[in-house]
Image (spheres, rainbow, N blue to C red):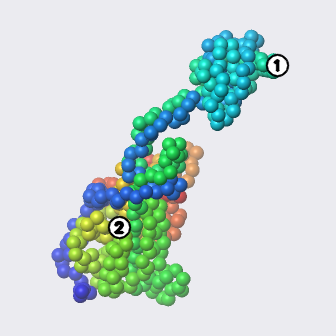
Amino acid sequence: MTFNAGLRPNGDMETFFKVKSVQEVLELIKRFQALDAEESPLAAARGRVLAEDVAADEDVPPFDRSTMDGFAVRAADTFGATEGLPALFTVVGEITMGRVPDLTVEPGQTARIWTGGMMPPGADAVVPLEYARPVDQTMVELARPAAPYDHVIRAGEDVKNGQVLVPKGRRLRPQDLGLLAALGREQVQVVRRPTAAVISTGDEIVPVSARPRPGQIRDVNTYTLAALIEEAHGRPILLGLVNDDPARLRAAVAAGLAQADTIIISGGSSVGVRDFTVDVFKSFAGSEILVHGVSVSPGKPTIMARIGNQTLWGLPGHTVSAMITCDLFIRPLLARLSGETDSGPAWGRTVKAVLTRNVPSVHGRQDYVRVRLEPDARTGLLAHPVLGKSGLISTMVKADGLICIGLNDEGLAKGSEVEVILFNS
């Protein structure tokens, strides 16, 4: 296929300037479908998204069990017991762990029980060991009253048979795995982990192992984007560096389409003499350009295309722009492909802080500004803007997070309370 290596026609330049808002791009992402389900061992399922509702097929626990070392009693027999006037009980045995009790607690009787032990018939409460005073081998004084089911977890109190416990679309956390283990689930149905192919472009880009000559820089975007993909529970596929050659770029994209759910190209997304990304995307049968330009800074020259349920992205070459647009758009896309129904914010948690200087913005674009946080005795946290061009990776290292200036705002004033989107650690 032959590509035009010169300036694109004015029509394409006009299309570039018909930028979409961040929200419009996020709405486009909602068109994509979750990937197929697969079975995963429970031990390998952390961070995966459930492809089915998980309901209990038994009560948990399946029996009444003690939560303390002590004495199993009939609660009514302990009423009025005090240090000065303890209740006297006959000890009828001991309940060993993991065994069904072979005794029954009758009025005036008790049985020694250990934490986790099965409550014997007749008993409905436990008096902790520290309130017990042995009288002899068969008698004990209990110096504290117990209400029914004190220090007892009842059968089904944790989980009821038939209850939906972990819903479809939940990204599994350690506590979710614990609950599934309690239900005896050795395997779970999860959505396939999405894959993202990463391609860095530019004649000036060299491998990290190389010593750059004048006019060259080392490849940064491959590593930052791959790490962000992993952080978003995706699996990166590194396709390496491609110089400014449209045929080689097309071959790399074709390789990505053969093995990945989304293809990410850093560099080559602007309108210029040697930016071929849109032309390459258009060259594939069934491709559709959805976005060429977003009203966001940094990151305006972002491209999004689709071929069926696969996406193709052209991100800016400047590392800060690439990182922010990756987190802003590709993170929610990966959550969507993973089947996650509630992915939360694009980044991690947020905190409130007070801005330490005026930050101007341009009306009609959404600005993301890097900030460094500092504790402050009076306000709690101060947010110091970290200024610098979008090609400076050190500004991201110095920053703790981002603040967003809205599409219709012209900046934020010193002293304003701002919401800081924290970088994931």
Mark 1 nearby-residue class (10 Å; few <14, some 14–19, many ≥20):
few
In the picture, measured across the screen, residue 210 lies left or right of residue 88, that is left
Residue 136: mark: 1
- The foreground one among 66 and 405 is 66
Counting from the top left corner in percent of width and height, residue 160 is at 46, 33
Label 2 sits on a secondary structure element that is loop
Task: Tell me the residue at 47%/83% (across/down).
Answer: 206
The reply to whether residue 6 is in sight is no
Q: Say which quarter of the image contains residue 258.
A: bottom left
Counting from the top left corner in percent of width and height, residue 348 is at 46, 54
Label 1 sits on a secondary structure element that is loop
In the picture, measured across the screen, residue 339 lies left or right of residue 349, that is left
Mark 2 nearby-residue class (10 Å; few <14, some 14–19, many ≥20):
many
Counting from the top left corner in percent of width and height, residue 295 is at 29, 63
Instruction: Report the residue that reaches farthest toward the left.
Output: 11
User: Disc 1 or 2, which lies upstream in sequence?
Assistant: 1
Instruction: Look at the picture and state if 396 lies above or below 123.
Output: below
Instruction: Look at the picture and state if 70 lies above or below 343.
Output: above
Q: Say which quarter of the image contains residue 305.
A: bottom left
Residue 261: mark: 2
Instruction: Please state which amino acid type lies under the numbered disc 1.
Output: Asp
Eye-nearest disc, 1 or 2: 1
Instruction: Look at the picture and state if 348 lies above or below 95.
Output: below
Instruction: Report the residue that reaches farthest toward the front.
Output: 102
The answer for how far apart the CA atoms under marks 1 and 2 are is 73 Å
Task: Tell me the residue at 35%/59% (across/down).
Answer: 36
The reply to whether residue 243 is in sight is yes
- The foreground one among 363 and 200 is 200
Instruction: Please state which amino acid type lies under the numbered disc 2.
Output: Asp
Task: Tell me the residue at 64%/28% (across/down).
Answer: 101
- The foreground one among 344 and 49 is 49
Counting from the top left corner in percent of width and height, residue 356 is at 48, 54
